[in-house]
């Protein structure tokens, strides 16, 4: 097997940089050797290995490479089991010169044109773009329903990172009060029409809760319908999903980004995968692609536009955010929680509210931001927020209660006395 290494002005690299580069080359070569060894074993079992095939570097190839500033390096790979020499499928890796911010330095930038270097090279491959809750769960489901399918999840950061911090670190799994499909869709700010079909009949909240219970995670439903793990720790959900993905055979690659995808002649998808930490580009051929990237407009557009499969993309915009309010009196109440208020901003919502050092938060505020996301975007995130701290009681009745309480406790400080009629 030959590996082509392109190094321009190799002799001009400083010793330290050369040593680091050589280590990267050796690491890449070892990884490639392992891939080829697995491929040889697979081909040997299928009877497609040519025994005693010689490995040569021709003089013409060497001369041609030298003219282009390339260094031809033969790698010694382990022969297939039961033979003294074996030929492996051909792989080529090209390491390019990459300009750096400082003086001349070099880094390995591999461009592999192989569709897959796994032992199941001819089997169908599903690539899931995004390692969040949707991507990980979908990969598990796909691998469970189709065990012969190779499933690969590509995530740019840490998998399930948002699941870990959701629900204040407890992870809000689903809602236990709206189990019927029609009632559940009514509580979606957007997309409720699209979800009215068979979507939740195929997999609804009860299915979600049943799946986690079957996999050892005990759940509880709180008064407002939110479902949390009994442990009150999101780690229970994260560990369950990752352990199950590993058990069923889902492959997970982190620190990589799928920058583009296109449809090739055989009807498959050609994905361009880039590594975040180094200048590394890989082309991967997949039978199926599942996009679970969240609301990144740039990423979604880059993945779907080139395919030209007829998708229509609605521009995403922020949702589920807190309100920033510059008010010194409000800032003095930072940390205070009101169990039941009525807030109005384009629409009304009732629920708990938390005063923070920058403004307001809590379930009632987050729901307002979700349901009014597009209106707030069009208004440049400015508006008038009305908060009723004693919902259900008319303003005149509130005044009457306060005046009566003042007359009854005239000598008490307002901070030490409050009418119980207004406490919810």
Image: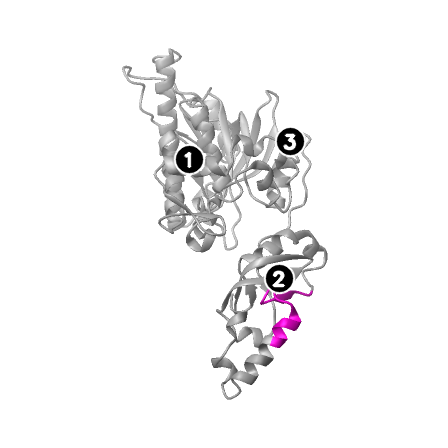
Q: Is residue 211 magenta?
A: no
Residue 167: tell me if it is visible.
Answer: yes
Q: Earlier in the sequence, mark 3 or mark 2?
A: 3
Residue 420: image location, x then y, percent: 50, 72
Which label sits on residue 307?
3
Furthest residue toward top: 47
Q: Horizontally, is 277 left or right of 351 in the view?
A: left
Residue topped by disc 1: 211
Q: Residue sitting at 35 percent across and 49 percent down?
A: 231
Q: Horizontally, is 302 left or right of 134 in the view?
A: right
Q: Nearer the viewer, residue 35 or 180?
A: 180
Residue topped by disc 2: 343
Furthest residue toward bottom: 411
Q: Nearer the viewer, mark 1 or mark 3?
A: 1
Quarter placement of the N terminus = top left
The span shown in magenta is 384-400
Q: Residue sitting at 61 percent across and 63 percent down?
A: 392
């Amino acid at each position: 097997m030959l590996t082509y290494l392109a190094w321009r002005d190799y002799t001009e690299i400083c010793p330290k940089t050369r040593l680091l580069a050589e280590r990267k080359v050796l690491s890449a070569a070892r990884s490639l050797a392992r891939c080829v060894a697995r491929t040889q074993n697979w081909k040997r079992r299928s009877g497609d290995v040519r025994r005693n095939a010689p490995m040569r570097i021709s003089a013409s190839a060497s001369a041609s490479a030298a003219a282009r500033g390339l260094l031809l390096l033969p790698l010694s790979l382990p022969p297939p089991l039961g033979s003294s020499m074996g030929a492996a499928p051909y792989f080529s890796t090209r390491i390019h010169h990459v300009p750096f911010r400082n003086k001349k330095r070099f880094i390995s930038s591999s461009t592999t044109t192989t569709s897959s270097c796994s032992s199941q090279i001819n089997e169908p491959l599903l690539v899931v773009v995004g390692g969040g809750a949707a991507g990980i769960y979908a990969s598990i489901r796909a691998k469970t329903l189709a065990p012969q399918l190779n499933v690969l999840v590509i995530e740019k950061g840490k998998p399930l990172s948002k699941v870990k911090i959701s629900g204040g670190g407890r992870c809000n799994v689903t809602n236990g009060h709206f189990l019927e499909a029609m009632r559940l869709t009514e509580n979606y700010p957007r997309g409720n029409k699209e979800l009215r079909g068979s979507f939740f009949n195929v997999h609804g909240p009860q299915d979600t809760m049943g799946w986690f219970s079957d996999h050892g995670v005990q759940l509880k439903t709180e008064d407002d319908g939110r479902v949390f793990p009994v442990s009150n720790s999101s780690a229970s959900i994260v560990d369950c999903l990752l352990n199950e993905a590993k058990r069923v055979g889902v492959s997970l690659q982190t620190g990589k980004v799928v920058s583009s995808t296109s449809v090739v002649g055989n009807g498959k998808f050609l994905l361009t995968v880039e590594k975040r930490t180094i200048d590394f580009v890989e082309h991967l051929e997949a039978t199926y692609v599942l996009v679970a990237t969240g609301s990144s407009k740039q990423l979604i557009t880059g993945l779907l536009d080139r395919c030209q499969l007829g998708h229509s993309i609605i521009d995403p915009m922020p949702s589920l955010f807190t309100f920033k309010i510059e008010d010194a009196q409000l800032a003095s109440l930072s940390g205070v929680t009101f169990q039941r208020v009525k807030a109005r901003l384009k629409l009304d919502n009732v629920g708990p509210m938390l005063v923070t050092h920058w403004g307001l938060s809590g379930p009632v505020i987050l729901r307002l931001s979700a349901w009014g996301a597009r209106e707030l975007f069009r208004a440049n995130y400015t508006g008038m927020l009305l908060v009723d701290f004693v919902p259900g009681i008319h303003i005149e009745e509130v005044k009457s209660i306060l005046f009566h309480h003042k007359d009854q406790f005239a000598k008490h400080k307002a901070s030490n006395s409050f009418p119980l009629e207004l406490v919810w």
